[in-house]
Image (tube, rainbow, N blue to C red):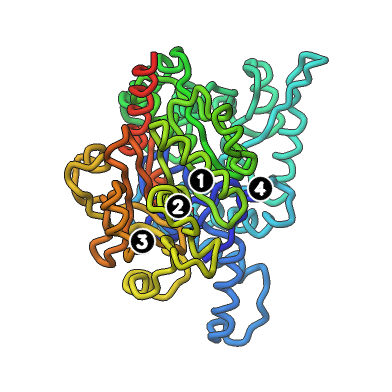
Amino acid sequence: MQQLNPYEHGECYVTVDGHEADLDLGHYERFLGIQTTKANNITTGRIYKSVIDKERRGDYLGKTIQVIPHITDEIKRNVKLLGNKYKFDFVITEIGGTVGDIESLPYLESIRQLKWELGKDALCVHLTYVPYLAAAGELKTKPTQHSVKELQSAGIQPDVLVLRTEHELSTTLRKKVALFCNVDENAVVQSIDAPTIYEVPILMQSQGLDVTILKKMGLPVGDTPGLGPWRAFLERRHKAEETAPLHIALVGKYDLQDAYKSIREALSQAGTYNDRKVSVDFVNSEKLTDENVAEALKGMAGVLIGPGFGERGVAGKFVAIKYARTHDIPTFGICLGMQCIAIEFARNVLGYADANSREMDEKTPHNVIDIMEEQKSITNMGGTMRLGAYECVLQKGSKAYEAYGTEHIQERHRHRYEFNNSFKEAYEAAGMKCVGINPESDLVEIVEIPALKWFVGTQFHPEYSSTVLHPHPLFVAFVKAAIENENEKK
Ligand code: GLN
């Protein structure tokens, strides 16, 4: 298990095989619609750990361990891992950071070696920034030139340059960059600010980036892909963006954009597929009280209770849930959000005033959310978190079943605590149903209040698997319910 603080890394993204990565991997999945695994993400920590483990095992026969060749060999091995294991036409490896960082030096050296070893089969795309000086009304290419020089001094000549810019780059400017940086003119591509990042593939294609790369690699250039479904999505999105925004409250404690990245993206995708612009309005749960909740949730067509860890901000989540439940506002609780839905119900409907999760209260006799060692040991192999994809069977007739349209699903988890099955009967008798169950461990994965319009909590994180071309059914259903709720009120 890794520790990723949302304030440093943004959201922690989880792959189906239970690897915790930063949010970049989520972008790749949303774009490609392909599920990634641990092999799709390398960290310096893992590289070093692997080298140290090998050294301890005696693999290096007692030789002195050095950055070159030991660390660089391990980096190269990881870069080549996917290509060796599976049949891919291309393996794209993104190296984060900035050229010149001390941290990235071993990676650059590995890339230099790989390019040398692979010849035409390797290609280097370098991303640079072109600042715009508003006062002078000028785009500056100097940082690009310097960045390329720095890269060249590491022995790498970039084949393609992608320039991040706020303004259109002129042909003259592209020519200048090409000349100074030793790059073909058609290999200088702009990456201009777009209304959403989902426009970017189309913008890259229109500049012939794909053709440039194929030609440079000596590969045949076939027909231009139509990207039909992608374009259809964008067209639908543009239309949706023109509608009046549907306000969804995102109740959580992490007051920064990236902390709930996948949830925001999943909601906005679901909006597009419902032909509606969605505005995700962050509501800080630390500031919510019974006195201000009506004002805070005013105009919200739906309420999403976010995931999280620890006590901070939990009280406000109960306040929001109670308000949404008693006012029948469509509500979606995710992970800690689902646990809070269960706790609020126990306190205010079942009458257990001291109901809580073992995470927040060690001693409560109404531990409706708890560590379920006996059940967890079946699936978790002793790790402290339930991580990665687990099966879930849905009850026919439930809102969840209606959304998925199938009985068997698999969803990704990242949590320690579970719904306590000894309270299940009491819940069901009082109107909260456990409609998604892990068939192996009998753990409750989804709760619902069928009497309400749409009130669903999932122990898993559906947001991780919502992609551009396959929006997540629960998000689509939630947004749909929110739209219906809003229409009813008109
Ligand atoms: N803190 C809760 C747990 O560990 C929920 C985690 C989460 O929301 N991802 O079970």
Which numbered mark, 2 or 3, is in the foreground of this view?
Answer: 2
Mark 1 element type: helix
Sequence-wise first label, 4 or 3: 3
The alpha-carbon separation of the residues under discs 2 and 3 comes to 52 Å
Mark 4 vs mark 1: give the one in front. Answer: 1
* Label 3 sits on residue: 85
Is residue 84 shown to the viewer in this render? no
Q: Amino acid at mark 3?
A: Lys
Residue closer to the observer: 328 or 156: 328
Picture residue at 59% right of the left edge, 23% below the top: 192
**Viewer-nearest residue: 111 or 3:** 3
The disc, 2 or 3, on the residue closer to the chain's N-terminal end is 3
Q: Looking at the rendered structure, which numbered label has been put on residue 347?
A: 2
* Residue at image point 33% right, 71% down: 375
Nearer to us: label 4 or label 3: 4
Q: Earlier in the sequence, mark 1 or mark 3?
A: 3
Lower position in the chain sequence, tag 4 or tag 2: 4
Q: Position of residue 147 (x, y in %)?
A: 72, 39
